[in-house]
């Protein structure tokens, strides 16, 4: 099962539940919200809260270059 968590406008985290925690991928959505671009994978974390926190920091670093 996959959950979608908004991170910033046009950026979302798609969460995957695994046996030992949660992982996911950060995706950029088109302005219309229909097309997706995979940016990078989020590593395994113990909880969805930790995964979201990691993803927000990573996305901020990605956008700041």
Image: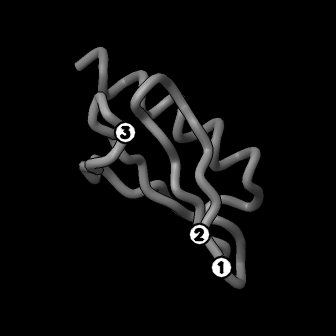
Secondary structure category for the residue under label 3: loop
Q: Spatial distance from mark 2 to mark 3, Cα to Cα?
A: 21 Å
Which residue is pictured at 29% across the width and 50% down the height?
A: 36
Q: Position of residue 26 (x, y in %)?
A: 41, 47
Q: Counting other residues with Cα less than 10 Å from the Cα at mark 2, is it few (<14), some (14-19), or many (20 or more)?
A: some
How is colour applied across the structure in the image?
A: one colour
Q: Position of residue 29 (x, y in %)?
A: 33, 39
Q: Spatial distance from mark 3 to mark 1, Cα to Cα?
A: 27 Å
Secondary structure category for the residue under label 2: strand
| Number of marks present in the image shown | 3
Q: Which residue is mark 3?
A: 33
- The relative height of residue 42 versus residue 58 in the rendered view (above or below) is below
**Residue 62 falls left or right of residue 14:** left
Label 3 or label 1, whichever lies nearer to me, is 3
Q: Which residue is mark 1?
A: 18
**Residue 34 falls left or right of residue 47:** left
Label 2 or label 1, whichever lies nearer to me, is 2
User: Toward which corner of the image does residue 15 lie, by quadrant?
Assistant: bottom right
Mark number, residue 16: 2
């Amino acid at each position: 099962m996959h959950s979608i968590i908004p991170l910033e406008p046009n950026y979302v985290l798609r969460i995957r539940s695994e046996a030992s925690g949660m992982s996911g991928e950060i995706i950029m959505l088109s302005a219309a919200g229909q097309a997706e671009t995979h940016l990078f994978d989020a590593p395994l974390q113990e909880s969805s809260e930790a995964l979201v926190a990691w993803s927000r920091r990573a996305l901020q670093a990605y956008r700041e270059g």
